[in-house]
Structure formats: structure tokens, C-alpha cells
């Protein structure tokens, strides 16, 4: 154990101290013996041997001390592990203790609930016994009541007979008293109505006084008495009161913040009025700007339209013959910017009702004329034409190619075509071919370069 190890270490230390003391004494003794060395060499050798023995013993004791220290360290490690296990055991013990306390509380709650339920059961049983007893009593009372009802029915029959006799006697005197009673009742009724009216008026007067005091803060209001010959119109007064009440209700509750709210609303009204004026001004300026834009756009459109119309006529005659007519017309009476544009084309010898009546080639040539007329007004660096020459015959294709060459100075044309004449007139050809099945290849040929090399 740890205590025993400490004891062994202490004992070892004491032995070391004792041997050190013996070593010191031995050293002194050796010094004394050295003096006597010359006298006795054998004694010196004996002393050296003893000295070596003492050193060996000292080394053995030191080794034993180191082993003891190692055992002490091991015991310390085991002691630390034991402390950790002890701490864990205490923690587990506290957890179990808390669980036991919680279970005890649950058991106590269950016992209290069980006692409460047992009390409810006992109370229910007592009430059941009491109700059974009451049921027996009620049955007895019911039997007695049935006997009483039967006896009462007998008495009732006798009383009914007597009552009928009395009623006959009473009817004889009732007619005599009826007239007297009617007169008396009328007098009493009138008197009672008058008393009620007086009380009602007095109550209304008190209510009116109280109302005047609460609503109008009027103190000391007294009723006014009129003479018998004075007249007073209650209807007019009632109407006047109703009018005044209506005016008061229309006024509503007094708002102490009304002036502040009025100031804020007035500021907001001024702000909104200013904003509205700005918006109206902006709207006016916007309308003026739109009008200016419309005027400028209309002017530009009419100028451009006139130029396109003239170029359209010139190109149309170059594609057809000099005697052919064409026209671009705007819808009459409509805004030029929104009006429909009618295209009129009349080849010589035909009177079509519309462009729809022309043949496919004529429609194509008319469309080409209009396209290039627009190009003359606003040229473009590139133009792509897709199968434009498909409906044209050879003569019209030649006219079309002449027109294209005329515009090649300012515009580069890309023409998608399958016509040989059109391909022959091109500067370069780009096509797709299949030298092998399933493998497409793009081929390009520059005809002018090839012709120059051939020449």
C-alpha cells in the first residue's frame, strides 16, 4: 500500500544516512590507517576491502531506493485512478439518489391520487345508498299522494256541484251589480289614468331637470305655471327640441386636437396642391413633347415615305417595263403614323384588284423593288436574302441579279439559293457536301479568284 511504501522509503533513507555516517567514519578511519600504512600494509588492504564493501552496500541501497520510488509512483497512479473511480461512483450514486427521490415523489402523488379516487368512490357509494333510501321514501309518498288525489277527486265532484248552485245564485245578483260596477270602474279608471299621467309628467320633469343639469350645466331650473286661459303648443316646442338635439348631435364630440389636426391637414393639402400643380405642369410639358415628337415623326415619316415611294417606282420600272405602274398610298383621313400603307402594282396588260391577284413571280419582284427602295433611303452594310429567286424565271433572275450588282458597292449580300444563275453571279460560294456517307463538309469557292487564275 501507499503507507507501507512510504515507510520503506523512509527506512531506506535512514539506512542511507547511517551508511553515509559509516562512510564518513570509515574515511576517518582510513585516514588514520593511512598514517599507519607504513606500519601495517595488511591492515590497509583490509580497510580497502571494507571500504569497497561499504561502497557496494551503498550502491545496493541506492538501487533499492530507486525501486522504492518507482513503486511509490505506481502506487500514486493507482491512487489517482481510485480517486477518479470514487468520484464517478459518487456521481452515479447522486443520480440514483435523485431518481429514487423522483420515484418517491411519483409514488406519493399516486398514493394521493389513489386516496382521492377512493374518497370519490366512497362518496359515490354513500350517495347511491342515500338515493336508494330516497327512492323508497318517494315511492311511499307517491302511493300516499295517489290516495289523496282519489279523495280529492271525490271532494272536487262535491264542490263542483255546490259551486254550480252558488253560480246560479250569483248570476242573479251579478246583472244588478254590473251597471253600478261599470260606472264605478269608469270613474276609478279615469282617476287612476290621471294619477299615472301626473306621475309620468312629474317624472319627465325631474328627468328633464337632471338632463339639463348634466348636459347643459343649468342650475336652479324651476317649472313654470300657466294660467288656465294661457295656451302652449307642445308640438311646436317638441319640434324645436328635436331640431336643437339634431344640431347638437351633428356637432359631434368636442375634439381638443382639432386645430392641430387642421394644421397638419392644411399643410398636407398645400403640399398635395403643389404636387398636383407640378404633375399638371409635367403632364402639359409631356403632352407638348409628345405633340412635338408626333409632328417631327410625321414630318420625317412623310419625307421618308415620299423618298421610298419614288425609289419604289424607279426600281419597279427597272424590274418590269417602262409602261408598268406601281404606287404606295397611305390610308386616307388617318394619322400618317398609324395609317395603313397600300401597295399597288399594275404590270402592263393587267388590271389586278390588289397585290394578291399578282402571280408569285410578280409578287416577288414587287417585294424586291420595295426592299431595295428602302435600301436606297437607309442603306445597310449587310443583307441576307433567303430563296428570294425561287419563284422567278430566268429573265426575272437576270433583272434581279443586275439590281443586286447595282447595290454591291455599298452592301454585301448573302443569298441562300439553289438557282444556278444566281450562284454563277456570286463572288464566292459556300455549300455543304457529303464526300462520305454521314460526313458533312463545308466547301467554299471564290469565283473571281478562280477566273483570274484561269485567265
Image: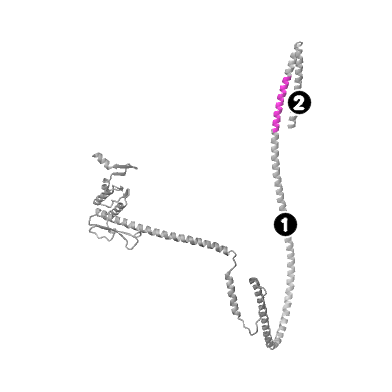
Task: Tell me where residue 96 appears, x and y as whole percent.
Answer: 70, 44
Residue 43 in view of the camera: no
Prevailing SS of the magenta stretch: helix
Residue 126 appearing in the image: yes
In the picture of the structure, the residue carrying the numbered disc 1 is 116
- The furthest residue to the top: 39
At x 25%, y 40%, the residue is 452
Q: Which residue is mark 2?
A: 14
Q: Quadrant of residue 282?
A: bottom left
Residue 430's label in the rendered image is none
Coordinates of residue 434 in the picture (x, y in percent)? 32, 42
The image position of residue 446, as x and y in percent, is 29, 42
Does residue 174 belong to the magenta stretch?
no
Q: Which of these two is toward me, 229 or 44?
A: 229
Percent across and percent down for residue 136 are 74, 68
- In the displayed structure, 74 sits above or below 448; it is above
Residue 66 inside the magenta-drawn segment: yes
Q: What residue range appears in magenta? A: 54-76
Amino acid at each position: 500500500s501507499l503507507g507501507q511504501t512510504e515507510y520503506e522509503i523512509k527506512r531506506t533513507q535512514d539506512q542511507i544516512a547511517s551508511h553515509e555516517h559509516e562512510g564518513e567514519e570509515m574515511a576517518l578511519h582510513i585516514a588514520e590507517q593511512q598514517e599507519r600504512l607504513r606500519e601495517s600494509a595488511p591492515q590497509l588492504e583490509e580497510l580497502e576491502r571494507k571500504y569497497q564493501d561499504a561502497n557496494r552496500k551503498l550502491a545496493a541501497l541506492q538501487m533499492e531506493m530507486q525501486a522504492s520510488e518507482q513503486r511509490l509512483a505506481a502506487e500514486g497512479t493507482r491512487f489517482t485512478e481510485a480517486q477518479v473511480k470514487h468520484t464517478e461512483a459518487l456521481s452515479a450514486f447522486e443520480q440514483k439518489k435523485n431518481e429514487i427521490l423522483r420515484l418517491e415523489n411519483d409514488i406519493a402523488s399516486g398514493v394521493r391520487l389513489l386516496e382521492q379516487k377512493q374518497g370519490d368512490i366512497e362518496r359515490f357509494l354513500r350517495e347511491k345508498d342515500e338515493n336508494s333510501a330516497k327512492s323508497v321514501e318517494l315511492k311511499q309518498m307517491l302511493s300516499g299522494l295517489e290516495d289523496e288525489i282519489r279523495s280529492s277527486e271525490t271532494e272536487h265532484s262535491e264542490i263542483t256541484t255546490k259551486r254550480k248552485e252558488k253560480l246560479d245564485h250569483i248570476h242573479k245578483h251579478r246583472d244588478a251589480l254590473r251597471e253600478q260596477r261599470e260606472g264605478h270602474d269608469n270613474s276609478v279608471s279615469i282617476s287612476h289614468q290621471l294619477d299615472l299621467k301626473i306621475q309620468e309628467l312629474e317624472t319627465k320633469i325631474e328627468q328633464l331637470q337632471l338632463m339639463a343639469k348634466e348636459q347643459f350645466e343649468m342650475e336652479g331650473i324651476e317649472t313654470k305655471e300657466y294660467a288656465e286661459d294661457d295656451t302652449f303648443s307642445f308640438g311646436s316646442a317638441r319640434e324645436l327640441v328635436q331640431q336643437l338635439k339634431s344640431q347638437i348631435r351633428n356637432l359631434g364630440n368636442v375634439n381638443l386636437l382639432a386645430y392641430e389636426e387642421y394644421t397638419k391637414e392644411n399643410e398636407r393639402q398645400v403640399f398635395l396642391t403643389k404636387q398636383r400643380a407640378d404633375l399638371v405642369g409635367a403632364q402639359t410639358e409631356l403632352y407638348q413633347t409628345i405633340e412635338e415628337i408626333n409632328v417631327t415623326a410625321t414630318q420625317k415619316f412623310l419625307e421618308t415615305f415620299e423618298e421610298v415611294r419614288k425609289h419604289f417606282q424607279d426600281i419597279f420600272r427597272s424590274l418590269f417595263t417602262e409602261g408598268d405602274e406601281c404606287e404606295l398610298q397611305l390610308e386616307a383621313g388617318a394619322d400618317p403614323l398609324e395609317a395603313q400603307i397600300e401597295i399597288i402594282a399594275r404590270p402592263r396588260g393587267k388590271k389586278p384588284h390588289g397585290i394578291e391577284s399578282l402571280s408569285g413571280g410578280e409578287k416577288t419582284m414587287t417585294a424586291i423593288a420595295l426592299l431595295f427602295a428602302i435600301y436606297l433611303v437607309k442603306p445597310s452594310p449587310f443583307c441576307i436574302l433567303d430563296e428570294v429567286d425561287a419563284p422567278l424565271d430566268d429573265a426575272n433572275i437576270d433583272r434581279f441579279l443586275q439590281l443586286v450588282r447595282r447595290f454591291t458597292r455599298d452592301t454585301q449580300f448573302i443569298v441562300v439559293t439553289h438557282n444556278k444563275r444566281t450562284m454563277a453571279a456570286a463572288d464566292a460560294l459556300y455549300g455543304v457536301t457529303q464526300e462520305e456517307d454521314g460526313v458533312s463538309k463545308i466547301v467554299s469557292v471564290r469565283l473571281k479568284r478562280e477566273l483570274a487564275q484561269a485567265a
